[in-house]
Amino acid sequence: MVSEQAAQVLVASNRGPVSYTLRDDGELEARRGGGGLVSGLSAIGPDTDAVWVCAALGEGDREAVRRTGGRLDQADTGDQRVRMLGIAPEVYADAYNAVANSTLWFVHHMLYQTPLEPAFGPEFRAQWASYEAYNRAFAEALADEAGDGAAVLVQDYHLALVPGMLRALRPDLRIGHFSHTPWAPVDYFRLLPDDIARQLLRGILGADRAAFLTHRWADAFTACCTELLGDTGKTRIGVHSLGADADFLRERAHRADVDDRIVSLREQIGEADGAPRKAIVRVDRTELSKNIVRGMLAYRQLLTDRPEWRGRVVHVAFAYPSRQDLAVYRSYTAEVQRVAEEINEEFGQEGWLPVVLHVEDDFARSLASYRLADVALVNPIRDGMNLVAKEIPVVSDNGCALVLSREAGAYEELGEDAVVVNPYDISATAAALHTALTMPDDERTQRTKRLAAAATALPPQRWFLDQLEALRALE
Ligand code: G6P
């Protein structure tokens, strides 16, 4: 049954644009999130009838679903119609933690320690059934909300089965799927049980268009389809890179709270010989794929190989909590802290702390670090895009040299003006840090300008509209 207020544009993603916490007094507090999808969707304007379908992530969200029946109060969402799905907590935990984040994320980012993992047995099959149920809940809600011939933009690896399921329920819809992650090379994708690997591919191929952040990930997906299914069927394959939101960033980065954070960061970084010390900045979620530990080991190597940097440089590392329900993320967070302390003990001197590590999320402080960075270290093992690499050159006050992993999606657009590294090569990363620190001012300024131009070529609004137009243009 099609609901009365049938939408013409629908977005589906696990995480929605708003989240709730239940306060002690029993009131719900809504918090709106940011990110590419939120600004992307804003591009269609208030006149288009759009709805965003997402999952309740925690207890506060579930309570909001109970109180509203899932159609959230638009006062909480910035006037966006949002349908939040109250999926049973056990089903949700299996789908999100076990399948999406511990399996699909690991496959696409190639994170397994393969001598022992993955090991797919009956427990995994039960979790997979939950992933199917969770995907089905999305497909049914979308089928219910969508008007005749509406465009539906399904996001990411959480919802890989949705396009196929939705196509079966509503053949009239135009369905797009977008992967925000890398896509695994064929041999690695084949770690998955054969039937599940095929089901995932067929799920995405239920869409009219399957799109990716770079050609590399799109080609990997096509290669998996060719190897496991023979071809990609009628589905068109698209590439839409996502750029930084320059207007938003430049305005936000010059508010008073960011200026305050610059002052306190400058104090922590300190001076040497009357001049501010150089800052090597990184900002990440504490995510296994971000390669924070090897980044620190490379910094230690730099201090070892080039003693002239001791006392003259600080590694400012922000590593914000992520997916803390997963034990492997908790131990990674602990390892990041341990290595930072080890470096500080080995090299620290009176008045010089070699690594300044912060683990509490603070967006204003992140922007402050972007503005003052001399060098940005972005060395992921593998990354769909990496927006930090794109944001830093946009807000940098005096130009910033970018050390960039060739395994980040952003490498396709930024590689030429970055100092490029193999993320596993600690010695080469140490050498790259030295190159970046000693880059002549003029060269750094010119490169930063070109990086900023490349980084902002496709802002989120363009990214979203291009996909919508491509979907509507299909025969
Ligand atoms: C990153 C990835 C996205 C993913 C998101 C999920 O931003 O690039 O592909 O959807 O993480 O993060 P979450 O915190 O919701 O698990």
Image (cartoon, rainbow, N blue to C red):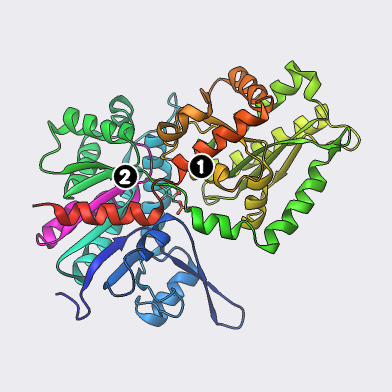
Ligand 1 lies under 8 Å from the Cβ of mark 1:
no
Q: Residue at x 80, y 19 (%)?
A: 307
Q: Which residue is mark 2?
A: 240
The residue tagged with tag 2: helix, strand or loop? loop
182 falls in the magenta region: yes
Q: Look at label 2 and name its amino acid.
A: His
* Circle 1 residues within 10 Å: few <14, some 14–19, many ≥20: many
At label 2, counting other C-alpha atoms closer than 10 Å, the crowd grade (few under 14, some 14-19, many 20 or more) is: some
Q: Which residues are magenta?
A: 157-183
SS at badge 1: helix
Quarter-wise, where is residue 344 in the image?
Answer: top right
Residue 287 vs 407, above or below: the answer is below
Q: Nearer the viewer, residue 271 or 15?
A: 271
Name the spot of residue 62 as percent of width and height, x first.
43, 71
Query: Residue at left 67%, top 51%?
Result: 368
Of mark 1 and mark 2, the one earlier in the sequence is 2
